[in-house]
Amino acid sequence: MSKIKDIISEIALPIVEKLGCELWDVEYVSEAGQWYLRVYIDKPEGISIDDCEAVSRAIDPILDERDPIPTSYIFEVSSAGLERPLKKPEHFERFIGEPVEVKLYKPQNGSKVFIGTLKSHDKGNVTIDTDGGELCFTKDQVALVRTRLL
């Protein structure tokens, strides 16, 4: 699966950058029996529907030509969103000092969801400041970290 994401990222990155955007993430997932290829983009002033359309129109013919995915799928280009998942180290670095939501695989102190200010990220370990103090979570505990609007 990650090989497909890597191939698509390699194809999409120069196109997305040429169109003035940042490649935030690539997903290749199965939902309700259908495969979806999603390319998430971002830029400082925000993403418009025109940006998504331009990126989609530029990438689609290359995907058709190179045919990197052997099965049928639905191709989508979308904004990373205001409450976006943080996956790469550079994502975390960009949002140090900002509000985040941390979801855990298993409850800790009776909760699986913690909200606070992102303090640090080191090799997958996440530290946040909350009203109750500083909380640290290991990479193995964390299911998802995403930005949060307060």
Image (spheres, rainbow, N blue to C red):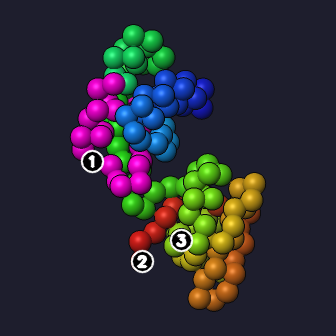
Which of the 4 quarters of the picture holds residue 134? bottom right
**Which quarter of the image is occupied by the C terminus?**
bottom left
| Residue 39 image point, x, y percent | 42, 37
In three-dimensional space, the C-alpha distance between marks 3 and 2, rounded to whole angstroms, equals 10 Å
Q: Residue 71 has which mark? A: none
| Residue 43 image point, x, y percent | 41, 49
In three-dimensional space, the C-alpha distance between marks 1 and 3, rounded to whole angstroms, equals 23 Å
Residue under label 3, please give it. 98
Sequence-wise, which precedes: disc 1 or disc 2?
Answer: 1
Amino acid type at image mark 2:
Leu
The 10 Å Cα crowd at callout 2, few under 14, some 14 to 19, many 20 or more, is few
**Of marks 1 and 2, the one in the foreground:** 1
Q: Nearer the viewer, residue 51 or 3?
A: 51
The residue positioned 63% from the left and 59% from the top of the image is: 93
Q: Specify whether 7 is left or right of 134.
A: left
Q: Nearer the viewer, residue 123 or 28?
A: 123
Residue under label 1, please give it. 48
Q: Residue 150 has which mark? A: 2
**Of marks 3 and 2, the one in the foreground:** 3
Residue 29 visible in image: no
Image height of 80 relative to 132, above or below: above
> Element type at marker 1?
loop
Residue span colored magenta:
35-58
